Amino acid sequence: MNKLFLSLLSLAAACMTSCTSPEPLTDYVDPRIGTAHSRWFFFTPAAVPFGMAKLAPTTDGHLGNPGGWQAVGYDARHTSIEGFASFHEFQVGGVVIAPTVGALQTVPGPLDDPEAGYRSRFDKKDEVARPGYYSVLLKDYGVKAELTATERVGFHRYTFPASEEANLIFNIGTKMGESGPARDASVTFTEDGRIEGWVVTEPVYVDIYQKGAVVKMYFSAVVDAEPASWGAFCGEELFAGERSRTGVGAGLYLRFDTRARRDVGVKIGLSYTSVENARLNLQAEAADLDFDGALLAANEAWEEALGRIRVEGGKREDRVKFYTGLFHAVLGRGLASDVNGAYPANDGTVGQIPLDPAGNPLHNHYNTDAIWGGFWNLTQLWSIAYPEYYADWISSQLLVYKDAGWLGDGIACSKYVSGVGTNFTGLAIAAAYNCGIRNFDVALGYEAALKNELGSEGRPAGAGKLDVGQFVERGYSPYSPELHMQTTPRGSGFSASHTLEYSFSAYAVAQMARQLGHEADYERLSKLSEGWKLLFDPETKLMRPRDEQGRFIADFDPYAPWVGFQEGNAVQYTYYVPHDIDRLVEMVGREEFNNRLDSTFLISRENIFGGGKTIDAFAGLHTYYNHGNQPNLHISGLFNFSGKPWLSQKWMRTICNEFYGTEEIHGYGYGQDEDQGQLGAWYVMASMGLFDVKGLTAPDPSFQLGSPLFDKITISLNPDYYEGREFVIETAGNTPENYYIGSVQLDGKPLTGIQLPFADVVRGGRLKITLAPEPNTSLTE
């Protein structure tokens, strides 16, 4: 087990023996919230925090998706399940087990014709989903399916009706989720009773950003019942009695007589490096563990992970939103390395993480969606509650840098899957350093971050920022309409948003440069951080793309998405100057800035702060404000820098109340793109009243205070990183009408502003916020 998971278990066990039993926080988590139109990795209840094994039902996973990002896997509106997949990550998915009864079928079949395959209908009333556990009754077969997991081992328990024709189908060689087409597969029923194999996939984003690379998944499973017969298959073709099959569509089936014993259990070890390591992971984590024991351990791990932040009071609905959001933030971006430190390297070989004297890996490797926008949610949350994971995540990213020479943003088994074609990993490294999280190779981290900001020669597509050379030379990336959605060394169809992003990340790495004594780098990066000014159009007071001749583009439509701006428009992206917001306010004019921004939220409230009720991840790209997508997530906090912080208090609280829901369709907006915990983590930070527009990139980072939704918030601090034991936020006057901060005290002393230094939080202490129905206009910056 990795050190993070051991920490979770030991802390949970200590609390169980020495503390009065607190209210179970897992009771507040509803993994089904937002599962209409959800991404492949979103609904994976049978998992542990940051784990590799993420077991979940799939309703349409075998359909894959054409672009690599569309919703696929589990949709709350569907009424049949096609099996239970083992791997759920960004661009990674596969290894499905499905129980059936009766005549054998070996293809899942279409959604609208369950009889044409092995899928089964189900009712929501027969479904249970909670952190670490999932169960459902498969109506067509009368089978109860149950799932749980350790870090790298999935546990299945199927209770069949009495039958001579109970089947377990191992569907290995089929396209699944975001993994793209299967290129090869193999499965074997060994003489000693193991079911083992692998599948090779070609995800869409891997094909785009690292053409020719593939993603491989391996497994080793044991079944606790003796099959009466077995066979292999390839698609619909059966090979009765065969123990092995290789090729696209390969699978294996076992048949059981369940008249005497009705339950069949499966333990499946997983790996991204080899069958042997899948077997090792199974042995190390689950050799003496049964389903119930694994479920207990998973529940304890989730209680500890969620308990890092304990909220009390307020509305139950808000606590459900809070802990479900925290669940998604801690669920995503899971392990990619084995118990022995083996990991999938960028070039397709197997790498080895260094070991400590006891033979344990010094850190872990992780799969991860891009960190695009993650500094307004995930990294802030990691920094205060999960700094050990943040440090591990950085060390993981540096493995890719050492192996391939460039940082990745999103990575799938170390393969580049940039997704948005940019790269904020350097910013995340710099922010961690600012926060005192430094137990990674700092010199290498700085080298990688600096190269990420300035390097263009030989830069691969997977490292993103292909136009960064233009930015370094000109101070901006030029817009070329013929490039449309492409980015090249010549420029980009997203040139304006790239210029704003590169300016921000240059600022972040500049601060790390200065702290490390690299003054020349600091000066150069600081100059680049002002590149955003070149796009500010004084006539419209909006950001406007410039072409290769340096001219503002003609026929400018500030509401048009994709014209110079990725997944947004000029109105939204004009606010993308988090590192120099004071100067932007000055250039717009403070009164006009505040009026425009307040009007934005007044208008956007009618549209539920983005895409309305349209179930589409990109529904809000043409609007004034789109909370369903990353480039907008800091905008509600900008009043903290324009003299009217009470409007940030009002609008952030209103977004928490109205954009976020507790239903399958109205969860994270309506069908918005949650991206491995980002929208959930935003809610966690905003609802606590702690948020930093600058993403903790300033040299002395601070949170801006907001309006907490709870009566008491207790953040447990990791003593390996911070001197404080806990930071407590208490509110008085916390009613739905009291949006505003009336007064603030830190450890009994009044505060005169809304900036709370990060150092004061991790030092530990007690913050008391009195809420009021009217703004305190003297409590400003």
Image (tube, rainbow, N blue to C red):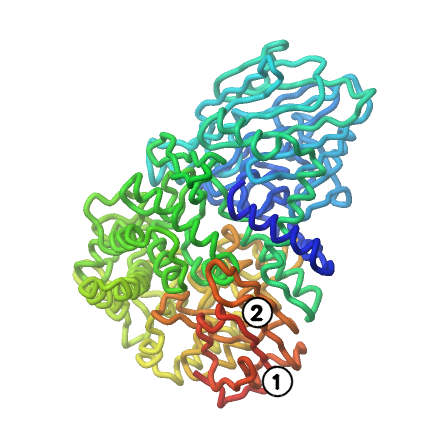
Q: Which quadrant of the view contains residue 44?
A: top right
Q: Nearer the viewer, residue 555 or 203?
A: 203
Q: Please provide percent x and percent y for residue 729.
A: 59, 73
Residue shown at 56% from the left, 50% from the top: 7
Q: Please provide percent x and percent y for residue 26.
A: 68, 54
Residue shown at 24% from the left, 58% from the top: 477
| Mark 2 and mark 1: Cα distance apart in space | 16 Å
Relative to 111, 432 lies left or right: left
Name the secondary structure under disc 2: helix
Above or below, 224 against 716 in this view is above
- Comes first in the chain, label 2 or label 1: 2
Q: Please provide percent x and percent y for residue 632.
A: 44, 64
* Residue 655 in sight in this render: no
Residue at label 1?
772
Relative to 405, 706 lies left or right: right
* Residue 115 in sight in this render: yes
Residue 152 disc label = none
Callout 2: few (<14), some (14-19), or many (20+) C-alpha neighbours within 10 Å? many
Residue 688 disc label = 2
Q: Nearer the viewer, residue 516 or 89?
A: 516
**Quadrant of the snapshot with the C terminus:** bottom left
